[in-house]
Image (cartoon, rainbow, N blue to C red):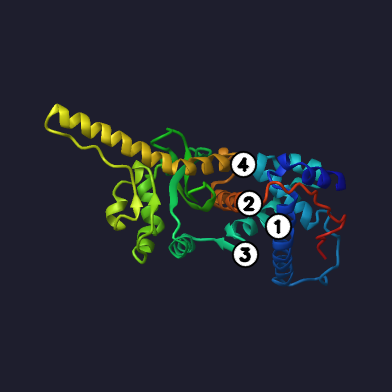
Amino acid sequence: MRGVRAMIVADRRVTGLSGEVIADLIAEVGPQWQLRHQARLLDRPRQRGIGAGARYRLVFIDRLLATLVHLRHGTTHDVLACWFGVNRSTISRAIAEVRPLLAERGCQVEPGVRLRTLADVIAFLGATGQTALMDATEIKVRRPAAERGGRTRFISGKSKQNAVKALILTDTDGQLLFCGETRPGSTADITQVRSSGIVDLLADTIHLRILADAGYQGLGGQTCGQVVTPPQKRRGRNLQNLQWLMSHHEQARFAHSSRRIRVEHGIAHLKNWRCLARHHGRRDVLDQNVRAVAGLLSDHQRTDRSSRQPLMLAPAAGAAS
């Protein structure tokens, strides 16, 4: 097991994270996991004292690494169980314990500052005066079973496939500010934003700019122009005026798309994590996967990539009592 742990940490391609980020995760998430573990032990009547019985074969560090590999490459629980020398149920339980903790962390924007909700994002943008980029991405999911209702809710009108849609906000450099508010694939982009409450949040701000694509046309009027979308086409009455309008319209759309292209780069980085390229598990945990990956990716983006110092892990660090 020590060899597996060292192999995962040594090569960034396994988890997509540097040793520095993994060390910070252990220091941040480890105490939270320990507190929840102790709370679960005290939450029910016990016939044995705390600490009695068999020891955990999978310590916290291994549980965290197994979760990171699962999120990055979509590795099955059976394969991870073979790697760590435990049962499949142990891996499933470990991922179910660690994934919510990763999802609750939010996106890092500054050292010690994390954005967990859309309200946090709007407050941060209003305080710093930054411009945000907004878009939505679709994650392919399995089709609901035939005997269940609402099978068409997840069929996307764009890709004609079963999908779940997630809302993305980045800064002008493409670094994540928020990822979440998942909705079935049949939901329109503008409907997703309206149901998320961002229109009400923008009502309390002024001079804030969020660049979006043509799928969000109409939000500009509801937000006093704070959501900026590409200009709509206008028709002239004569040929000379029409040619000028079309040329001006294409230039304006090109300038707008050039400013918001970085959000597409941010989405591409998210899709490098296999669990968001195509989700094979239960749809009710997909929102946790989205928020967990967004937080991990923001840590990677905010970390100095020139740092290549290896992470040294103690053999029995993070063991549960």
> x, y (%) of residue 204?
36, 67
* Residue 85: mark: none
Q: Are marks 2 and 4 in contact (CB under 8 Å)?
A: yes
Query: Where 236 falls versus 301 (above or below)?
Result: above
Tell me, yes or no, whether the two marked residues, 2 and 1, touch with CB atoms within 8 Å. yes
Nearer mark to the viewer, of 2 and 3: 3
Distance of mark 2 from mark 3, alpha carbons?
Answer: 14 Å
Q: Is residue 265 left or right of residue 296?
A: left
Which residue is at 57% across, 61% downward?
114
Q: Which callout, 2 or 1, points at the residue further toward the start of the chain? A: 1
Image coordinates of residue 161 in percent, x first then y, are 46, 34
Residue located beneath label 3 in the image: 112
**Residue denoted by label 2:** 296
Percent position (x, y) of residue 86? 81, 47
Residue lying at 73% horizontally and 49% vertically, measured from the top left: 307
- Crowd band around label 3 with a 10 angstrom C-alpha radius: few (<14), some (14–19), many (20+): few
- The residue that disc 4 covers is 273
Residue at point 57% right, 41% down? 269
- Residue type at mark 2: give it: Leu
Numbered disc 3: secondary structure: loop
Image vertical order of residue 181 relative to residue 257, above or below: below
Tell me the kind of residue under disc 4. Answer: Trp
Camera-side mark, 3 or 1? 3
Q: Residues within 10 Å of mark 2 (few under 14, many from 20)?
A: many
- Mark 2 to mark 1 CA distance (whole Å): 9 Å
Which amino acid is tagged 3? Gly
Whole-number angstrom distance, CA of label 3 to CA of label 1: 13 Å
Q: Secondary structure at mark 1?
A: helix
For the point 68% across and 56% down, the residue is: 98
Q: Badge 1 is on which residue? A: 25
Foreground: 37 or 8? Answer: 8
